[in-house]
Amino acid sequence: MRLPLVTAIALALVGTNPAASVLAAAPAPTSAAASSITTQLPHTAKPTHYAVEITPHADKMTFDGKVAIDVSVLQATDRIVLQAANLSLARGTLTQKGGKPQAAKVSTDAEAQTATFAFDKPLAVGEYVLSIDYSGVINTQANGLFALDYTTAQGARRALFTQFENSDARRFIPSWDEPNFKATFDLAINAPAGQMAVSNMPVASSKPGANGRTRIAFQTSPKMSTYLLFVSVGDFERATVTADNGTEIGVIAQKGKVDQAQFALESGRDVLHEYNAYFGIPYPLPKLDNIAAPGRSQFFSAMENWGAIFTFEYSLLLDPAVANIDTKQGVFTVAAHEIAHQWFGNLVTMAWWDDLWLNEASPTGWRRAPRQNCIRNGISTRPARR
């Protein structure tokens, strides 16, 4: 995410060589050091995998959800505490691997944004599955699951997106919503038939569902923090190119506008090539989409969700009638910044939000490198003069 104030502070702290702070070798954390990492949750349990299914009701601005969380209980405890905000939790059950499900007594603390699942007897150390049925609201501001309305020649349209940085995944899934709690995700969404759904990973299956919906399930994600999870549903079009390493690069925009994302599409391919070579660690996901959203925010222009970058249209699309050198360079710079986050922030993540400055400093420093290399290699980042 591009945060002007954070970026300014970050560059001042990092100085002229931001790479030195990130690439310097650090000793592996000891168990004592790990237990001292900032958290607002008990150290008694942690998630390893989330299986999430969401049914949005865009007309009512609500959604239904269910999640099965693979949980490792690390110390004997009679409760599991995680984070939830503005969610109605209908049911919670816990099943030990190979055992019978047991119902939990569910309580929430709105001020602390937590949910507690209490049990009659202490849970032994081991592996469990915590299953939760719940519902939530679709917001009008960019936090949690939110809606953006826009007009087209065919009439009014509404698209849904998610924005979870820094602590808003808890408005979408009851979860360990802190950057140090990484897990894998299986996500499925019951979308209106005919609409496109996009998430961090490619679509694994798409099947007709009930009530005029299509159940779209995505491939399992790599291990990642909750704030990087993403899903969007709407009347979209997608264009793709294939990078030289086989990664599918995509741009997604409202129908009728995807052609305006052609420069961003080609820039994404070129930037990914440069970063793969520069960092020496290949981009690990099978695809990298950049999703254009109507409207704008006073707080950010783009967000680095792993494999599914969210960008407001004004920072991604180029209208040939008004595009100029500055707007084209702006699109390239935003793309380079967010793609750098695929390594710095996504692959390697700060343990707590007080190191967000470093998360932003590295992409800010390195986003210049691909543009310089593209220019040297004859790849234009400027519009053709007419």
Image (cartoon, rainbow, N blue to C red):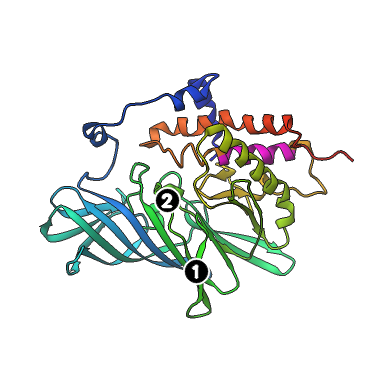
Of the numbered discs 1 and 2, the one sitting upstream in the chain is 1
Figure quadrant of residue 34: top left
Figure quadrant of residue 144: bottom left
Residue 73 in the image: above or below residue 57: above
Residue 263 magenta-highlighted: no
Q: Residue 205 bears which disc, if any?
A: 1
Residue 338 magenta-highlighted: yes
Circle 1 sits in a helix, a strand or a loop, which is it?
strand
Q: Give the left or right position of residue 231, taking residue 316 as reference.
A: left
Place of residue 364 in the rendered image (x, y in percent of width and height, measured from the top left): 56, 31
**Magenta range:** 327-339
Residue 293 in the image: above or below residue 281: below
Q: Tell me the kind of residue under disc 2.
A: Pro
223 vs 295, nearest the viewer:
223
Circle 2 sits in a helix, a strand or a loop, which is it?
loop
The residue that label 2 is drawn on is 222
**Farthest-out residue, right:** 386
Place of residue 345 in the rendered image (x, y in percent of width and height, measured from the top left): 46, 39
| Residue in the picture at 66% in, 50% down | 313
| Residue in the picture at 66% in, 60% down | 254
**In this rendering, does residue 174 appear at all?**
no
